[in-house]
Amino acid sequence: GENVEQHPSTLSVQEGDSAVIKCTYSDSASNYFPWYKQELGKGPQLIIDIRSNVGEKKDQRIAVTLNKTAKHFSLHITETQPEDSAVYFCAPYAYKYIFGTGTRLKVLA
Amino acid sequence: NAGVMQNPRHLVRRRGQEARLRCSPMKGHSHVYWYRQLPEEGLKFMVYLQKENIIDESGMPKERFSAEFPKEGPSILRIQQVVRGDSAAYFCASSDAGGYSNQPQHFGDGTRLSIL
């Protein structure tokens, strides 16, 4: 079955700095790559996604890059703010969503 | 537009009782997914349903767990004879297209089930 790993598991950055989270997957049939943000007591919220025919997508301070050959995709957050503090999950899709184990991001004011 | 609605938000049951978790998908969505999340872990797929049909239940335990999505009303995840290991957060997601068409899923805020 699909094996999904996220790194790092925790990440602390100073406000204003950038954060990068990497997701590695094993199923070459994966063709859709979303990132979710989960705040305490809430459900995951889709923040950005990319499909397999695109290498990069940007939405304001958030971007996702995809390397299908190497089977990994990364979440980039620039100019981090305290409200970016949350747990982030990748969930590559190959006939079903397989969630990574999550990255806890702390943005220090 | 209302998002995915789950209720109750918190549910406490004693061992051996039944737990019923409800999920109303987003308006216009006819595909529902259930996930389980243990503390400090990611979400684990349990079951995918369309109206009146179970499409994929490969992640759901064969015993004590069942799910339905009737023609009218919310989707129900039912856990019979609950045990302490069933304590978790259960999330529902919905999409407007099938599970094999890689459409975004939208999540509710979950039901936190605690077993005494």
Image (spheres, coloured by chain):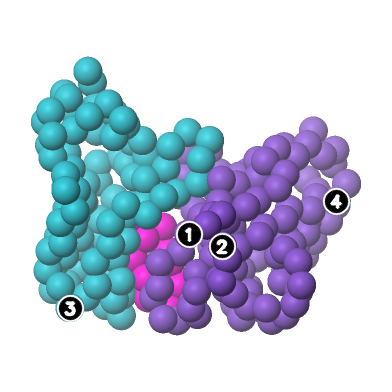
Mark 1 or 4, closer to the camera = 1
Looking at the picture, which amino acid does disc 1 mark?
Answer: His
**For mark 4, what is the residue?**
B18
Chain letter for the residue marked with disc 3 in the picture: A
Whole-number angstrom distance, CA of label 2 to CA of label 4? 26 Å
Q: Quadrant of the N terminus of chain A?
A: bottom left
Looking at the picture, which amino acid does disc 2 mark?
Answer: Met
Mark 1 or 2, closer to the camera = 2
Looking at the picture, which amino acid does disc 4 mark?
Answer: Glu
Do circles 2 and 4 both sit on a common chain? yes
Residue B15 in view of the camera = yes
Pick whichever of labels 2 and 4 is earlier in the sequence. Answer: 4
Pointers 3 and 4 in contact (C-beta within 8 Å): no
Pick whichever of labels 1 and 4 is earlier in the sequence. Answer: 4
**For mark 2, what is the residue?**
B26
Pointers 1 and 2 in contact (C-beta within 8 Å): yes
